[in-house]
Amino acid sequence: MKRRHFTALAATAITGAFTVPAALAQDKTIKILVGFPPGGSADVIARLLAEKMRGPLGANVIVDNKPGAGGRVALQELKRAAPDGQTLILSPSGALVIQPWLFANLGYDPVKDFTPVSLVSTFDFAVTAGPGAPAGDLKAVMAWMKANPGKANYATSGAGTVPHFAGQLLAQATGVTMTHVAYRGGAPAAQDLIGGQVPLMVDTASETIEHHKAGKVRILAVTGEQRSKALPEVPTLKEQGINMAADAFFGLYGPAGMAPDLVARIDRAVTEALRSPEVQEKVYSFGLVPNHAGPGELMAMQAAHLKRWEAPIKASGFKAE
């Protein structure tokens, strides 16, 4: 897919033709697809949203887990759904802004096949050292990696993910050649980090924050422009003199062609849900930030992230299988 194709579509996605009536059938069930197994941050947040949205929408709202292919299975199902507001998805940004540059046959167009509804959360990543790394701050660890290239490995929850390429940006920004070690999920990566099999991990803070608090690993930096509210004691990369930042988001989407007033109604329900202290506390507990924005802002954010990641991904030479 070409960048100008994405850009042109992004400019028209909200103003395009919407022909479906905006009624939500009161006797129907609204399902929020999640492209990952139960128990992860996407699943937990989707279930909290579903619970809080039932009242405002006057309908039963459930979560339907459709794991597989890094979220692509669920997005492909959403593409096939009717644009009646009864099928939505809570998706992390990677499947919409990273994977389009990796796969020749993605199974969906990240812009024209979906309707942005609500930005739900933004988040950055944690750079975490395990017992296989030396003591000291991030600069000390990176200096050690530079002096020991055979040990300069970093783990992530998978190849072709945002953390994968965030780690490569970190390597470029510090002048250290690091080898990416991809795991099938954040949990096994964290376990090998704790066990000393890999010295460094770049992934969502939720994967290592409890181990950090327990003293098993050390979160040395967060990749956002500002410190994380979940880890206020941990400096950003830029605070440590490393000119690099990387972030991501969770967005609620529907199929293409949803009527604007239907989108607005669902967006209002999300707004109300995100005001709940219970929802905010849970989102923060995963190292995420509850951060609502409407469909236009979500569309713009997605377009900006698509553009931002194109060059680093192409420069990496990584090809998805």
Image (tube, rainbow, N blue to C red):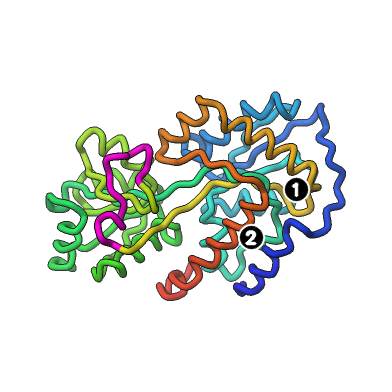
**Which quarter of the picture shows residue 266?**
top right
Q: Are marks 2 and 1 in contact (CB under 8 Å)?
A: no
* Disc 2/disc 1 C-alpha distance (Å): 15 Å
| Disc on the earlier residue, 2 or 1 | 1
- Looking at the picture, does residue 118 appear above or below residue 145? above
Q: Is residue 67 left or right of residue 263?
A: left
Q: Residue at x 70, y 64 (%)?
A: 11
Residue 66 visible somewhere in the drawing:
no
* Residue 50, position as x, y percentages in the image: 63, 31
Q: Is residue 143 left or right of residue 246?
A: left
Q: Which mark is residue 81?
A: 1
Kind of residue indicated by mark 2: Pro
Magenta segment: 227-242
Q: Residue at x 36, y 57 (%)?
A: 182
* Residue 100, position as x, y percentages in the image: 57, 65
Residue 160 visible somewhere in the drawing:
yes
The front one of 68 and 8 is 8
Kind of residue indicated by mark 1: Ala
Q: Is residue 65 left or right of residue 171?
A: right
Q: Mark 1 falls on what kind of element?
A: loop
Q: Residue at x 40, y 40 (%)?
A: 287
* Residue 285, position as x, y percentages in the image: 41, 33
Give the labeled residue for mark 2.
Answer: 110
Q: Mark 2 falls on what kind of element?
A: loop
Q: Nearer the viewer, mark 2 or mark 1?
A: 2
Mark 1 residue crowding within 10 angstroms, few (<14) / some (14–19) / many (20+): some
Q: Is residue 234 magenta?
A: yes
Name the dominant secondary structure of the magenta segment.
Answer: loop
